[in-house]
Image (cartoon, rainbow, N blue to C red):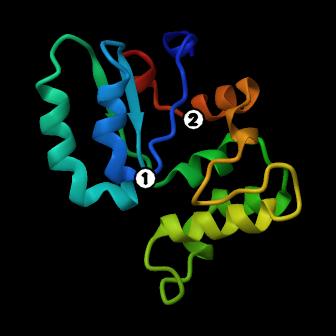
Amino acid sequence: MHAFKNSNVTSSNGNGNLIKCVKELGLRDTLVIADGAAFGSLIETCISSFQIQTERRISLWLPESFEYLILKSGILKSEKLIQILDNIPEYVECEKYESWEKFFTEILITLTADGVEKYSKNILNSYYLQDWVVDKIKEQLPIEVINK
């Protein structure tokens, strides 16, 4: 994880603000992590914008969802969660969820509803910006992203 040891976490407040947020970071190398399930329509525009910024390295990683990374990180302790993550297709009801991202969001909101880690899709709780939480989420990054 040393490749991102001194990195900062910035919330773009939605995929639509991603290009602006990355530009505001200046010339720093940047790892962009966006919800793959919700990012499809913006990918071409973002890649075009990132390619012309040749004075720095911009890496893009699109996991299923940010909520999935949180759930997979181990910061929430639940035997049921472990069972679900070990066999996701068995638990996702296609009739109820239009995407896995919606499924993961509902699980995260339900699991954290009564705790300090209460999750909201609209505003990122400062709980998730603590160094130890960010480190646990970073551990979910694929080796290809870490070594860039």
Q: Which residue is mark 1?
A: 14
Q: Secondary structure at mark 1?
A: loop
The Cα atoms of the two marked residues, 1 and 2, are separated by: 21 Å
Q: Is residue 19 above or below residue 15?
A: above
Image quadrant assignment for residue 99: bottom left
Q: Residue 73's x, y, as percent?
A: 68, 40
Q: Residue 119's x, y, as percent?
A: 70, 56
Left or right of residue 33: residue 2: right
Q: Residue at x 58, y 45 (%)?
A: 69
- Residue 74, numbered label: none
Mark 1 or mark 2: name the one nearer the start of the chain. Answer: 1
Mark 1 against mark 2, which lies toward the viewer? 1
Near-viewer residue (91 or 70): 70
Image quadrant assignment for residue 121: bottom right
Which image quarter is the C terminus in? Answer: top left
Q: Secondary structure at mark 2?
A: loop
Looking at numbered disc 2 in the image, what kind of residue is underneath it? Answer: Gln
Q: Across the whole image, how many numbered discs are drawn on residues?
A: 2
Looking at numbered disc 1 in the image, what kind of residue is underneath it? Answer: Gly
Image quadrant assignment for residue 147: top left
- Residue 140, numbered label: 2
